[in-house]
Amino acid sequence: MIRQAVTDDAEELALLIKQVEMESPYMLYGAGEREISAQKQSDIIQALSESDNSAIFLAVKDGQLAGYLFAIGGNTKKNEHSAYIVIGLRKENQGRGIGTALFGELDSWAFKHKLHRLELTVIKENLSAVKLYEKTGFSLEGIKKDSLYMDGRFVDEYYMSKILEG
């Protein structure tokens, strides 16, 4: 089941984000690198829910959060038609259609809210994520060379987008 986040989700969402950052080497923040609290998540949920071009979607499986997708809308007249996407899934739920379902819900919401562009970045070697993004309609726009430093080396990121017609 996919639904939008409400402030009552803050504590469980904070725990999920911590878990995803601990499990995945591909998230921008590493395990314990930033403070993630229920209060901060509650504030973020509240702020994004008050915006016409931002939302947080949650995947629920067996009564617990399995994944999240943040759509963070532009905050100026020139970019309010777009949203930057951040997605995270528990490792045990990857490859089970949950990411695809989150993007499906995002698409429906984005059309309803008259967004025109969705965008994201992904570490080039994160092949399963790149495959998911391509499967859900994202296209490669460019490469951010030596964008991040991890495991003692520089890595490239893909810049990907999806233009919504209609």
Image (tube, grey):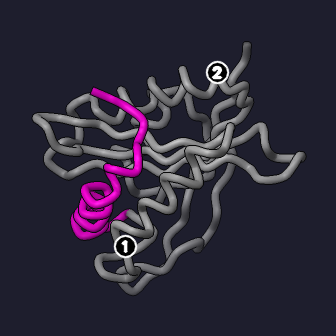
Please rate how many residues cluster around mark 1, counting C-alpha atoms within 10 Å: few if below 14, some from 14 to 19, many from 20: some
> Residue 51 got which mark?
none
* Residue holding disc 1: 36
Residue shown at 64% from the left, 32% from the top: 162
- Establish if 48 lies above or below 165: below
| Left or right: 105 as drawn, with respect to 141 | left
- The residue under the point 56% across, 44% down is 49
Where is residue 125, by image quadrant? bottom left
Q: Is residue 78 above or below residue 23?
A: above
Residue 107 on image: x %, y %: 54, 25
- Give the crowd class for mark 2: few <14, some 14-19, many >=20 residues within 10 Å: few
In the rendered image, the residue lying farthest to the right is 78
Q: Main secondary structure of the magenta part?
A: helix
The magenta segment? 1-26
Q: Is residue 1 left or right of residue 58?
A: left
Q: Which residue is mark 2?
A: 111
Instruction: Work out how far the residue at label 2 is from the one at label 1, CA to CA, in angstroms.
Output: 31 Å
**In this rendering, would 9 be left or right of 19?**
right
Residue placed furthest toward the front: 8
Secondary structure, mark 1, is loop
Q: Amino acid at mark 2?
A: Phe
Inspect the image, locate mark 1, and give the three-letter code of the amino acid beneath it.
Answer: Ile
Q: Residue at x 68, y 24 (%)?
A: 164
Residue lying farthest to the left in this orientation = 62
* Residue 2 within the magenta-colored segment of the rendering: yes
Quadrant containing the N terminus is: top left
